[in-house]
Amino acid sequence: MPKKEKNKTRKPLLHRHKPAPRNKYFTDEEIMKLEDEFVEAYLKNEAHPYRTLLRLYMRYWKELLLSLIFYFIKTSPVLALPIVTANIINIATARPENALEQAAINIAVIVFLMLLNIPTHILHVRYYSRALRGVEAGLRGAMVRKLQQLSITFHKEMQSGRIQSKLMRDVETVHALSSQIFLTIPGIVINMVTALVVVVTKNLTVFSFFLLTIPTSVIIMRIFNGNIRKYNAQFRKDMENTSADIMDMIEMNQITRAHALENVQVKKLTGRLNSVANTGFKLDMTHAKFGSVSWVVFSLFQLLCLVFSAFLAFNGKIEIGDISLYQSYFNTLTGQVSTLIGLFPVITKGMDSVSSIGEILGARDIEDNKGKKKMTTLKGEYDFRDVDFFYTPDQPVLQDLDLKVNAGETIAIVGESGSGKSTILNLVLGFNKPKMGKIFIDGKDMDEIDLQSYRKHIAIVPQTSVLFTGTIKDNITYGFSRISKKRIDEAVKAANLTEFINSLPQGLDTMLDEHGANLSGGQRQRIAIARAIIRDPKVIIFDEATSALDTVSEKEIQSALNNLTEGRTTFIVAHRLSTIRDADRIAVIKQGRCVEIGTYDALMEKRGEYYKMQTLQDGVK
């Protein structure tokens, strides 16, 4: 089939906002509870990542216990092989009457244990993987849910690249750590305990020699602990900063190319990447020294064990076959201790990632709606009383702002850049809260309202349209799982998109590039307007909504917006004053205060601040 025909018959992508498929092992309620436990785990053990990690896996203790049992069974051939080997050597040297029978029994046992490895290994992986993947998905889910609860200020202060690094790289590191903990460490413990138990029952003198490996390993770890922790933390921070810089580079690419600043950007990123490489090199060299010292020390121990057990056999203290037994188990013991020491950098790195994830899960800057009144309906009446807002006390954004907006009224907010217009909109949305004063919505104190339920009655068209990669239909119907075609068509018509949509071969199912890059600015903005219209809101916020439209499109859409705002409370922030003449009232904001308010005609007749702004803008034209 030709490529064009394929495109025509291709089914439209599923809406991004549709619910995810049900988890195979857990209900939605269980997953939400699990995510709450993750958050609680960090909040209770903020300074103790080891306890936090343990708490995360407590929900899966049954799976982990079964995994451990099957792990022990599957590794039994390795544990039993030295004993069987020693028995056969001793049988061959002693040559008892039933030598063949004893040898056959030993061989049968080890063969049975080897065959048992297949089903037990599958069951071991089944249970530990269910636990690890559940925690991995739940941990990311908890972070995503917490990010939706955190304030806009938090998101402004923490770069998106850093958040992405924590959400993907740090969780992956915790998964790697968990894999080592639940795969490698149980094997280490089982092998070490088995080796020590067998040896202590055979010969206390050799057992004492075995015990020397433990304090030796502790000393080695303490010597290298400081540098490993330091370089791990530095490497993680460098990676976060690099990820943030790369995100900035991608966002700034058009500006960079337009001003021929490619070399400047390359130099900046190269410097950052070199810094990461240098820190990584120091970390690698520390690991290399740590690993080589460990290997040499325990290799010498193995050689000493061989010499020591041979000396005991030569003096008749042990049987010849026991040399093989002790050597095998000592190799096992030193090998496991070396592996445990080798895991130390991985564990340090993983725990550092647990602490990094905690910067999101443990953040207190959240919007708390628990116990507050839910708004099932909204009239749209607002009353700002003596509202002050500032980011720093010495630079107030709003001062003693008094503003009353009636239900169903269209109010335009104008003023110079930095006068506080966008701040007022953020206060209306509840993104910011007054530092002093009160805001009442339908006569209710905004501090006592469940803001999430309140925002369900609001639609916003921001100054910069926000579109995601998907179809035009997906972008317009964002937030709706099911919606009628009639309602979509009405929204498209109201946003003056009908002619544009009909001109596209795939219509509403046309795919958008990242951020809608294959559309003009005006087309992107009208899609954002259609998204607002389709929500049938009680309150509408237009933040420079027509700024990206050309003069023709602006006039065409203005009448549609007028029809849309009828009967709804509407806030309009505009620099282009020609777009707000039909507003019920216009509020002029200057230095954080409302200095004038009234109809267009009344303000022009007054010849005050608004008159000056309108005259200046007309003169510029």
Image (cartoon, rainbow, N blue to C red):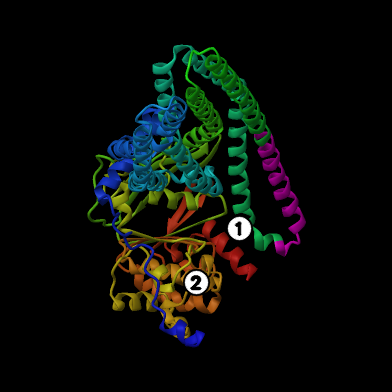
Seen in the picture, residue 166 relative to 487 is either above or below; the reply is above
Q: Nearer the viewer, residue 38 or 266?
A: 38
- Res. 512 mark: 2
Q: Nearer the viewer, residue 340 or 176?
A: 340
Along the horizontal axis of the image, is 481 left or right of 178? Answer: left
Seen in the picture, residue 585 relative to 77 is either above or below; the reply is below
Mark 1: give few (<14), some (14-19) or many (20+) Cα within 10 Å: few
Mark 2: give few (<14), some (14-19) or many (20+) Cα within 10 Å: some
Assess whether residue 265 is covered by the magenta stretch: yes
Element carrying mark 2 = loop
Along the horizontal axis of the image, is 184 left or right of 379? Answer: right
Q: Which residues are magenta?
A: 257-283
Along the horizontal axis of the image, is 278 left or right of 155? Answer: right
Q: Amino acid at mark 1?
A: Glu
Quarter of the image that includes the C terminus: bottom right
Q: Amino acid at mark 2?
A: Leu
Q: Which residue bears the numbered disc 1?
A: 251
Seen in the picture, residue 248 relative to 67 is either above or below; the reply is below
Mark earlier in primary sequence (2, 1): 1
Residue 511 appears at what percent x and percent y?
Answer: 47, 74
Residue 84 visible here: yes
